[in-house]
Amino acid sequence: MTRDHLKETERTRLRRKRQRGSHQLATIHAILDATPMSYVGYLVNGEPRVTPTIHWRRGDHIYWHGSRASAALIAATEGSVCVTAAVLDGLVLGRSGLHHSANYRSVMVFGKPAEVQNRNEKLGRLEAFINSLFPKRWRSLRPLTHRELDATTVLSLPINEASAKTRSGGPNDPEADVSHPVWAGTVPVRLVLDSPLADPRLPEGVEKLRHGRCFGRHWRW
């Protein structure tokens, strides 16, 4: 592994459509940053499990958190995991059913996660989590209690063994199908934040934030 390129391994080698694959760290980071949702695959007593979660990235590590009593987090620390994240960018309509497809960006990360044990580091990672979704919000929140912090587990997974796979562009119809009289092309897909809905229990005098002021960015995945 170099600073900007991960070594291809047996688990990250792309068998099909290799031209769509990448082991560039910048590509992997960008996809992980483009969506907060990922899925953690692990084994429980030899049986597969996949748990959806919200992740965040700091440098060459990804993090996720949950209750200390979570069976999923406990199982994840007992062996290797596979974390996947994907962004759907478009629906591709070809001229035959076989040539319908989707435009996407995806990542798979393999490895053994470790629990963040240091209290100050864990607090800092949780602050980074909140601020990655809602910039500068952490400093305005009620501080976590010692009990809340102790009841929360934060897992860290180094991005040492990972690959990305993407598709873009229109349908890949064979030339013989191009004259078939049916619409073909791409329907772009994106996910954006809608206008905030204020909690009706807001104390008097608390400003009801507008969309552009509530969040530091508009998600456009």
Image: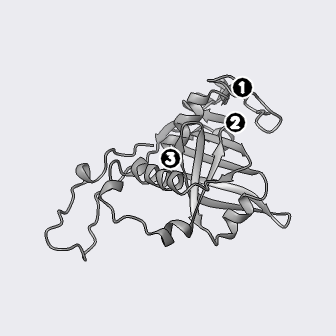
Is 144 located above or below residue 18 in the figure?
Answer: below
Label 2 secondary element? loop
Label 3 secondary element? loop
Contact (Cβ within 8 Å) of mark 2 with mark 1:
yes
When asked about the image quadrant of residue 43, the answer is bottom right
Per the model, the C-alpha gap separating discs 2 and 1 is 8 Å
Residue furthest left in the image: 205
**x and y percentages locating residue 90 in the rendered image:** 51, 41
Q: Which residue bears the numbered disc 1?
A: 1
Which is more N-terminal, label 1 or label 3? 1
Q: Please tell me which residue lies in front, 98 or 201.
A: 201
Residue type, numbered disc 1: Met
**x and y percentages locating residue 160 in the rendered image:** 69, 36
Residue type, numbered disc 2: Asn
Q: Identify which residue is drawn at 28% across, 65% down.
A: 197
Q: Which residue bears the numbered disc 2?
A: 160
Per the model, the C-alpha gap separating discs 2 and 3 is 20 Å
Q: Identify which residue is drawn at 61% across, 34% down.
A: 166
Per the model, the C-alpha gap separating discs 3 and 1 is 25 Å
Q: Which mark is residue 35?
A: 3
